[in-house]
Structures are given as structure tokens and as C-alpha cells.
Amino acid sequence: MKAIELKKKYIEFFQTKTHKEIPSAPLIPEHDPSVLFTTAGMHPLVPFLMGEPHPSGKRLVSVQKCMRTQDIEEVGDATHTTFFEMLGNWSMGDYFKKEAITWSFEFLTGKNWLHLPLKNLSVTCFVGDNDAPKDEESAGIWKSLGIPAERIAFLPKKDNWWGPAGETGPCGPDTEMFYWVSPGPAPQKFDPSDKRWVEIWNDVFMQYNKTKEGKFVPLTQKNVDTGLGVERVTMVMQGKKTVFDTELFQPIFKEIQKLSGSKPTPKNIVSFRIVADHMRASTFILGDERGVVPSNVDQGYILRRYIRRVIRHGRKLGITHDFCPNIALAIINMYKNEYPLLLQKERVIIEELRKEEDKFQKTLEQGLKEFETLTKDNKNITGKEAFLLFQSYGFPLEITQELAAEKNLKVDVAEFNVEFEKHQELSRIGAEKKFKGGLGEVSEMTVKYHTATHLLNEALRKVLSPDIKQRGSNITPERLRFDFNFDRKLTPEEVKKVEDEVNKRIKESLEVRREELPLKEAFAQGAQGEFGAKYTDVVSVYSIGNYSKEICGGPHVKNTKELGHFKILKEESSAAGVRRIKAVVE
Ligand code: ATP
Ligand code: MG
């Protein structure tokens, strides 16, 4: 079975269980400052798991593009990639363990579905501790379906628990499904530490609320959140040893082979895998709804790191000329039907790759020479030296670390950071934020900024031009950032007018209301949507008095008077024909 068929079957299966399909959210999340990328299908659904009603109902299913930079070190093994697609199904306070597990089982083993043999399946469940009891319920359901007791392992929180560590909010046990991927029969007894068992699917049960006092009280709205990896299950379905042996990577390998003239061998296979994975990641970041370009901060820095690492590994394979655009074209070609935006953004993707590659190819050779000189007596790299490699040759710290590790040498990261601060080039390099997994992240300030963003959007249309559309938005608890189409700098008078307009609406104490409408109806009523965004058939629409109407997932304040005073900090260019405003409410 090919990946494309797997995805189709999954959606179909859950549609027969009355789930509604929702589109993949962007890789770059809109209103969650706690994380740089969408790391799982549940991530864009956080407000709904918190109780906000979802316009598509209580049973949802999706194919979500995901990015886990935190897995970058593992790229090279058989089953980890930084970019992958996740299939997921959700219950928002609807069905719970019995249905979720039964359906997972049916999809995996059912004759009309994946039809995987039971003899290769194992599962893990939560073992229980002082906070919550052993998850006998899940184990019992697995047993009733035919999973033998010796194929069920009970593990502690570290493995089988989802939710905030040390914080408050929804949490609960999960149950994970593993598949035996080695030739020869699977052992009778399941040993979850044996790497030949590969995790393919995870069902999370949000069952408790962790209180400030550290108590775990049962939730009123119990949710199910599941995630199945497309690459891994495709590998399993095709009896391949690694995800890279499937049609999801082989065309990329062919392209690398063509460009480098080298075949994959045990010695260079890790470079093949890194180039293939990071090029997929880079292509999807550049081609995202909220695509970013290489830079020294946040997502742009991760992208830069990916591309530069690709170039270095390309060189290890013997490629010295420009090659990233060629590989990206192969990837766009593979995914253009499922993600038409990649094709629409092809020019930007290719152009940005070419520019970044050009920049780095120029300095890489010399930087590598410098690195050799610095380490010729097998001496560790000081922070100052790492900083020199960064500043003069564009080596991201991680590349220097990787080069050093190949020689069993270390890099003084603490000193590097000191140097870095000194130069104040960037403040947040490498400070990659990991998705903490908690649902309680929606702070009061973020909610305020969310509503302020709607007011700003409308004010811009009023003051500047009715043609203005949102081109991107990003909110942190400290500020809002809003991109919109406009082809010149705003005058100071215009900035002031926009501010006054927003503050006027805040003072009017306008009520914020939410309703659900069919998408067509929402547009017919003049609701604003984001340029290029994908929407479900029924959408939630937020109105602020009679002033603004936008398609939006929320959450928002109840009344504009909660916002305080609105102030624009900065107005600048973001891309050709796109302006960017940063603003605060105080
Ligand atoms: P692992 O322990 O193998 O890293 P995980 O516990 O991080 O997996 P989950 O967070 O439960 O995985 O994600 C749900 C599913 O997504 C997994 O069962 C797997 O199929 C897939 N998945 C997770 N991480 C990756 C990755 N880096 N590359 C490919 N697929 C992944
Ligand atoms: Mg993992």
C-alpha cells in the first residue's frame, strides 16, 4: 500500500465512524508562541480540546503536516524524520477509550483496512502511580479485542502519560501501538525497549485536570487525541526496513544520486537521509501557508540550519555545485496534488534555496579549512572559535558541534553564548522552544492580542484601503504582529489614525460574539478570511459589535473594554508588497 492510499483509507475509515475531515493547519502555528512549529495534529486543536466548540463537530479526523526539530539528532535512524505527516482522529467530549481503542484495532487489523497481522502487534498502557491508577480499562479493552496479556506492557508517566509536567491543566494516560519490523517472528513477550518494535500510533486520553494543589480530578469534557505516523505505517505496510525505503523518499534519493554520482552505501547512508529529510522540511517550511525565509531567528533560523546542514552533507556526498533547488523540485512534484500551495509557491521556494545555498557555498569551503586548522592538534573548540565560525563563515553552532563530534571533540557552548550576547546579533538563536504539550498555554494576554488583531485588521481597511487582507499573524504574550498587503510605508499620520481607530473601538465596549456558519454564508456576510487559508465547510466566525467579522478559531475576550490602550510599536516592510505592524495593548 502506498502512502497516498493509507491516508485515503484512514479518512474514509473515520468518516464511516461519523468523523468530519478537517484540513491540515499550517506548519507554522498562528497564535501559539510556545512553539515554533506544529508538532502534532492535536496542536491546532488546543482551544477545542479546552472546551471551545469546533464548527465541524465533536468527531474530527485529519492529515496534518508536522515538524519536530527536536528529533533532528535522530534523523539517520530507521524511523525518525523532522518533517512527517500525522493522521489523527479526535473526540471532543464525545466517545472515549472503548471506541477509540476498538477503532484503532479495527483500522490496523480489519480486512478492509490495513489488515496487519495480530502476531506483529503490541501495546503499552499506563502503569499507574500516586496521581492516577493503572489504566486497566485500556488494557482490558485491548485484551477483549484479542491482544494477549504478554503483548501489553505497562509503563510509567515518562512513556504513557500526556499533559503538563508540573503545571496545571488537562492530562491523562495514553496507549501506544507497536509493530514488529524485523525479519523472523516477533517474540511472544513484548519488550518495549527492543528497537525492533516500532511505535506507529498513539491514543491519548485526556481524562484528568491537574489542579494548583497538584490533585488529579476527573475532567467533565473527556477527550481523545490520536496520532499515527504516515511514514512509519507506510514502511510497515510495505515491509520495508526504514521509512527511507518507501516511495516517500526514494525519488529524493534518486535525485541525490544523480546530482552526487554516489550510490547510498552503509557509509554515506546517514548523509542521504539527512539531505532527504531536511530538504523535505525546508521545502514545506518555505511553502507553508505562513512560509518564512532563512534568517537568524525563530523558524527562519531552523530553516537556515536545515539548509546549511543539507549543503554540508551534500558536500560529503561529493556535490559541490548548487543542488538544493533540484531536490526541492522533485519534492514539490511528489506533493503538488496534496499540497497545491507548494506549486503556487514554487518560485519563492526555489529562489530562497538558491540564495541561501549561494551564500553558504561561498564560505563553507573556507570555513571547513578554518575548522581543520583550529582542530589540528585534536583540540576542543572554544566558544570564541565557534563564534568566529558562525560570524565569518556562517556556520550555525550545531554544524560546528556536528563537525567536532565527528572528531570526538567538544564545543564550549556556554562561552559561545556569551560571545553571542556580546555581539547582540540575535537574541534567540538556537533557543528552540519545544512544544511542552500542556493545554493551559492560552494566556490572558494572548487572548487580548487575538482580539486586538481583529480590530487592527478592520482599522487598516478603514484607514488605508478596503482591499487590505491579512497575510500573516503572530502573537506572543508580549505583542501582536500583523502582516498585510500594502505597497508603501505608512505615514506617521496614518499610523496615528489606525491607533486612534482601534482605541475608539476599545472604548466603545463592543461585545465579541461567536457563531458557526457555512463557509459560503460567512463570506456572503462579508466575514474576513486570511489570504490563502484553507477552511472547513462550517466555520466559526467572530464578530466585534457591528465593526468586524472574521473567520477565526478564537479564543477572544468577551468585550473590547478588556483590552486597554492600543499602541503601534513599529511599521515596516515584511516582503514585497507586504507590510508588518507590531503593536501592544497596555
Ligand atoms: P518515538 O518515541 O518513536 O519518537 P513519539 O512518542 O515521539 O515516537 P508521538 O508523539 O506519540 O510519537 O507521535 C505519534 C506518532 O507520530 C508516532 O506513533 C509515530 O508514528 C509518529 N512520529 C512521531 N515522531 C516521528 C518522527 N520523528 N518521524 C516520523 N514519525 C514520527
Ligand atoms: Mg519522539
Image (cartoon, rainbow, N blue to C red):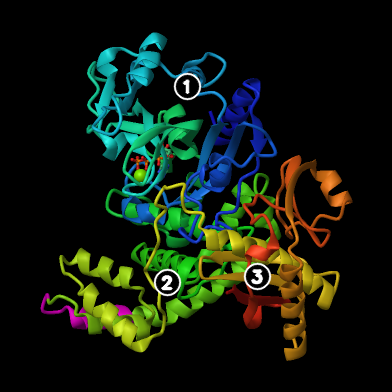
Q: Which residue is mark 2?
A: 320
Q: Position of residue 465 (x, y in %)?
A: 85, 74
Badge 2 vs badge 1, beta-carbon distance below 8 Å: no
455 to 59, vertically: above or below: below
SS class of the residue under badge 2?
loop
308 to 164, vertically: above or below: below
SS class of the residue under badge 3?
strand
Who comes first in sequence, dot 1 or dot 3? Answer: 1
- Quarter of the image that includes the C terminus: bottom right
Q: CA distance from mark 1 to mark 3?
A: 44 Å
- The three-letter code of the residue at mark 2 reads Thr
Q: Nearer the viewer, mark 1 or mark 3?
A: 3
Magenta region includes residue 528: no
420 to 455, vertically: above or below: below
Q: Residue at x 65, y 39 (%)?
A: 54
Magenta region includes residue 372: yes
Who comes first in sequence, dot 2 or dot 3? Answer: 2
- The three-letter code of the residue at mark 3 reads Phe
Q: CA distance from mark 2 to mark 3?
A: 40 Å
Q: CA distance from mark 2 to mark 1?
A: 45 Å
Q: Position of residue 278 (x, y in %)?
A: 45, 58
Could you tell me if residue 222 is visible in this image? Answer: no
Magenta residues, as a range? 367-378
Q: Which residue is mark 3?
A: 482
